[in-house]
Amino acid sequence: MYAIIETGGEQLRVEPGRFYDIRHFASLKSKNLSSNTKILIYRVLMIRNETTINIGQPWLKNAVIKGRILHSHLENKITVYKMNSKKKTRRKFGHRQNSARFVVDSICLDGKDL
């Protein structure tokens, strides 16, 4: 059993009991991303359970992914280097993206855990 969800500008294939890294949750502020914060994701695009496949247009109604945040962290730093040739202009800076790791507890459709 698995589901395809949309969160953080990405589409993910999620399964119960596994953890995933997401760049950002739009509805949660960084101060609310503490450990064991329960989350509900309503943007479910598809659910596959045994032999049945439910596809939304664009999202499934009455479908919820229940999970909790394990921890939030910063990803590895990327270095951006900008240079204009023949102008002696150089600029170097870095950036670290906020990220959160969450675990999927259950997939619900029409109020029933699958």
Image (cartoon, rainbow, N blue to C red):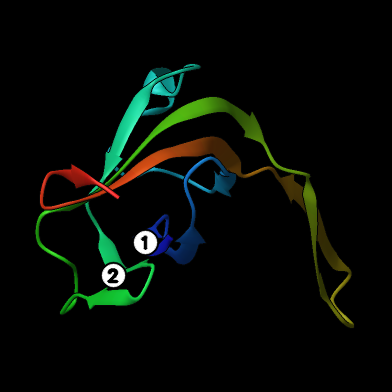
Please tell me which residue is depicted at 41% across the width and 18% down the height of the picture: 31
Q: Position of residue 19 (x, y in %)?
A: 58, 42
In the rendered structure, find residue 109 and report the number of the disc placed on it.
none
Left or right: where 95 falls relative to 29: right
Q: Amino acid at mark 2?
A: Leu
Q: Amino acid at mark 1?
A: Ile
In the rendered structure, find residue 5 and report the number of the disc placed on it.
1
Please tell me which residue is depicted at 43% across the width and 60% down the height of the picture: 1
Q: Position of residue 63 (x, y in %)?
A: 19, 55
Residue 25 visible in the current orientation: yes
Residue 28 visible in the current orientation: no
Q: In terms of image quadrants, where is residue 80?
A: bottom right
Q: Measure the alpha-carbon separation of dots 2 and 1.
A: 6 Å
Helix, strand or loop at mark 2 = strand
The reply to whether the C-beta atoms of the residues labelled 2 and 1 are less than 8 Å apart is: yes
Give the residue at mark 2.
Answer: 45
Helix, strand or loop at mark 1 = strand
Q: In terms of image quadrants, where is residue 113?
A: top left
Q: Position of residue 60 (x, y in %)?
A: 16, 66
